[in-house]
Image: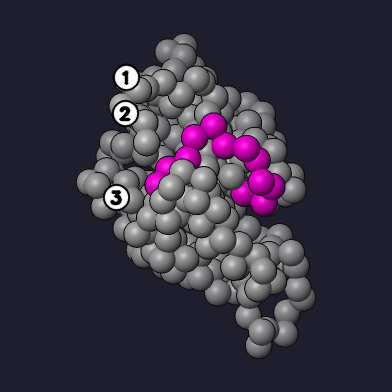
Amino acid sequence: MKLDILAIGAHPDDVELGCGGSIAKEIALGKKVGIIDLTRGELGTRGSAEIRDVESSNAAKILGVAVRENLAFRDGFFLNDEAHQLEVIKMIRKYQPEIVLCNAVDDRHIDHPKGSKLVSDACFLSGLIKIETSVAGISQKAWRPKQVYHYIQWKNIEPDFVVDVSGYIHTKLEAVKAYSSQFYDPKSKEPSSPITSKNFLDSIVYRAQDLGRLIGVEHAEGFVSERYVAVKSFDKLF
């Protein structure tokens, strides 16, 4: 299955939090989008890997993605090495995306920048014909995405560009709330963490509102690009 966009996150819920609105919008525009989770989030303060498996499946249905897979790397301990790069390369070659969305280049959680660099490196290596990979005994062809963009996570990193997601923030929020074990729940008896506060849940909307304010729309999501952002003409900007 060829995808237009492949969104990759170190943990289930990374993609929803970072670019859920953009994904929902692109799907509504007819794009085929998939999600790859690098880990099952087994070190999360609340819930369990099994619970997050169910939650991520529910979130995928809410967003309407064509496919979602989990590579089951070790949460907190996966590496940006050859073995892990090859597994990501297999996914890139399997789905042949034009665009890859991945973790923040710098962030509070160590898996986020680590996952960011791992995916970025794999996207480059995936285009090298002398790297041989196969899935289910079938050899894969080299494939390099045209663009790699990094969504914003905990830290307020300055974006290179923002996407107008007005009209899709509610879909994003619904997908995030599918991870009911992870976020704000005043009835929960489990330990608290920085992401279980009401302020964090509220920040999903107020960050999107602030980015939207800066470009004159209701809601927006920001991204960092590895290459110059090019436009065909001045009137293509707004």
Secondary-structure class at tag 3: helix
- Label 2 close to label 1 by CB (< 8 Å): yes
Which of disc 2 and disc 3 is earlier in sequence? 3
Type of residue at label 1? Lys
The answer for how far apart the CA atoms under marks 2 and 1 are is 7 Å
Q: According to the image, label 2 marks what residue?
A: 236
Q: From the viewer's side, name the closer residue of 235 and 199.
A: 235
Give the magenta range: 153-164
Residue 44 against residue 1 in the figure, above or below: below
Q: Which residue is mark 3?
A: 27
**Alpha-carbon neighbours of circle 1 within 10 Å: few (<14), some, or many (≥20)?**
few
Q: Can residue 27 be seen?
A: yes
Q: Quadrant of the N terminus?
A: top left
Q: Is residue 138 above or below residue 30?
A: above
Q: Amino acid at mark 2?
A: Lys
**Front residue (pair 44, 148):** 148
Residue at 66% across, 46% down: 156
Dot label at residue 232: 1
The Cα–Cα distance between marks 3 and 2, rounded to whole angstroms, is: 22 Å
Q: Secondary structure at mark 2?
A: helix
Please name which of the two marks, 3 or 2, marks the residue nearer to the observer: 2
Query: In the displayed structure, does residue 2 sit left or right of residue 237?
Result: left
Q: Give the mark nearer the N terminus: 3 vs 1.
A: 3
Q: Residue at x 31, y 38 (%)?
A: 3
Q: Nearer the viewer, residue 208 or 93?
A: 208
Q: Residue furthest bottom?
A: 187
Task: Report the residue at 35% width, 23% height from top.
Answer: 234
